[in-house]
Amino acid sequence: MVAPTSPAMEEKITSAIVERFFAKLKDHLSVDVAIVGAGPSGLIAAHDLATAGKKVALFEKKLAPGGGVWGGGMLFNEIVFQDDALSILDDFSITHRPAGDGYHTADAVEVASGLIFGAMKAGAALFNTVSVEDIVFQDGRVAGVVINWTPVVHMNLHVDPLVVLSKVVVDGTGHPSVVANLAARKAGVRLDTETGGVMGEKPMWVEKGEKSTVENTRRIHPGLYASGMAANNVSGGFRMGPIFGGMFLSGRKLARLILEDLG
């Protein structure tokens, strides 16, 4: 029997996946910005930061990035925006339709997929099914994230994690504000909030919640920022439901603040 002279198709396919993935991971073991949570604010910030030439990595614990966008309101996959967020939808070529009184609707699936595509085409790297289980803390500042596969975390397997170093870490984990809680609990830092800790999210008040989502998007400790609903949870803002203008504006503000910080 004559031995094959070249690798079988199965080997070529597997080799291509392994080589390209590990090249991508190795290239992002040290980044300018590590964004934890690939929801709308994180994806928009990643797009703007990558467009400005920063090396950005997003870490999303779920299989599908996009945060809470996909399901719209109670699985009605339409979401609402205000006038002042439309320019951002246009930047991502996302279709929107007027709904009267300064409000507009957009298809939730188009929004989520459009944000993901836009962020990655701008140059951001996205690692899905990756959970952040700890932070790197050096010289009084947050200096990176500690990552592991989400199935490893869910199954409580004793598997040591890996580390990604970063000049800036963003908590974009939504309602739980996972990274801010880690910083307060494990590093014992005082966050830039009224209490010095994670204050917790208030109940729904759409008008207040939309404003506070943007207002609370800021640096909460050296090296650590919060955006979107994570920012509201950290600073005690109101919940706002399936209206996303504030989330979009939060991501754009976040990128601007980080660019100013990084010079």
Image (cartoon, rainbow, N blue to C red):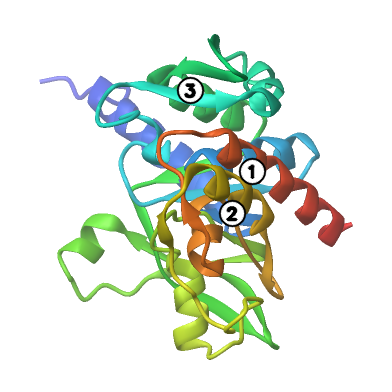
Residue occupied by mark 1: 251
Residue occupied by mark 2: 227
Location of residue 114 with respect to 17 vertically, above or below: above
* Residue 108 in the image, given as x and y percentages of width and height: 40, 22
Residue occupied by mark 3: 111
Location of residue 227 with respect to 76 vertically, above or below: below
Question: In the displayed structure, does residue 205 sit left or right of residue 61?
Answer: right
Residue at position x 32%, y 23% in the image: 6
Question: In the displayed structure, does residue 11 sit left or right of residue 47?
Answer: left
- Mark closer to the chain start, 1 or 2: 2
* Residue 38 in the image, given as x and y percentages of width and height: 48, 44
Identify which amino acid the numbered label 3 is placed on. Answer: Val
Q: Quadrant of residue 132?
A: bottom left
Location of residue 56 with respect to 175 vertically, above or below: above
Residue at position x 35%, y 52% in the image: 61
Location of residue 85 with respect to 215 vertically, above or below: above
- Mark closer to the chain start, 3 or 1: 3
Q: CB under 8 Å between callouts 1 and 2?
A: yes
